[in-house]
Amino acid sequence: MLDFAALPARSAGSAPFDPGATASSGLPVTYDAGPPGVCQASNGLVHILGAGQCTVEASQPGNAEYEAAESVARTFSIFVPTLDVDASGAASTYDALSDGLLILRYLFGAEGTALTESVVGAGRPRRCGEDIGCYSTAVRAALDVDGNRRHGRADRRRAD
């Protein structure tokens, strides 16, 4: 028998996690997750790939001593976090514009002061390029606005 608690909602860009199912036999539990592009399971962890509904199926195939347990599936939501690049906490047009400019600069490869110059105010909790770069990397799945699963830094090579 499998014990598999409900899974809480998570944000896109969250770290891989152990779903936490256990078998009464003590045998290892394996996972499958999907749909593709939203989540996947590997090595006992669920990896979040994008926003949507993720279904994780836990199974325990049994062995010579124990029969296979009946599989149990749990579905949870993956949401796109609200972006607040400079951690201002403000929900104004100006903040959306400054956050947008920071994201564009980050995606096009700007770093350090080139990333933040004339955009981030002195009173912002996240104001240095390194902090903003780390934040942008952590929420990169939320930056995939066209759903092509490409949301990294700009490729600086020319395509001739």
Image (tube, rainbow, N blue to C red):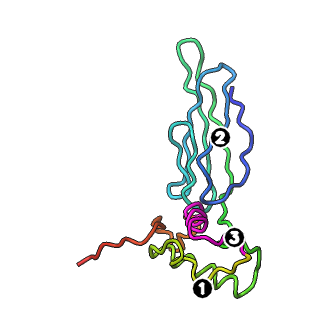
Three-letter amino acid code at the position of disc 1:
Ser
In this figure, which residue is indicated by the disc labeled 2?
19
Which picture quadrant has residue 6? top right
Query: Is 120 left or right of 123, judged from the image as shown?
Result: left
In this figure, which residue is indicated by the disc labeled 3?
82
In this figure, which residue is indicated by the disc labeled 1?
118
Rounded to the nearest angstrom, the CA distance separating label 3 from label 2 is 24 Å
The residue at the point 74 percent across, 76 percent down is 123
The residue at the point 70 percent across, 87 percent down is 94
Residue 80, position in %: x, y?
65, 66
Work out which residue is located at the far top of the displayed protein and give it.
65
Q: Nearer the viewer, residue 5 or 1?
A: 5
Residue 45, position in %: x, y?
57, 41
The overriding secondary structure of the stretch rendered in magenta is: helix
Work out which residue is located at the far left of the displayed protein and give it.
160
Rounded to the nearest angstrom, the CA distance separating label 2 from label 1 is 43 Å
Residue 33, position in %: x, y?
56, 46
Residue 107, placed above or below residue 71: below
Mark 2 surroundings: few (<14), some (14-19) or many (≥20) residues within 10 A: many
Residue 65, placed above or below residue 60: above
Of pointers 1 and 3, the one earlier in the residue sequence: 3
Magenta range is 124-139
Image quadrant where one finds the C terminus: bottom left
Three-letter amino acid code at the position of disc 3:
Thr
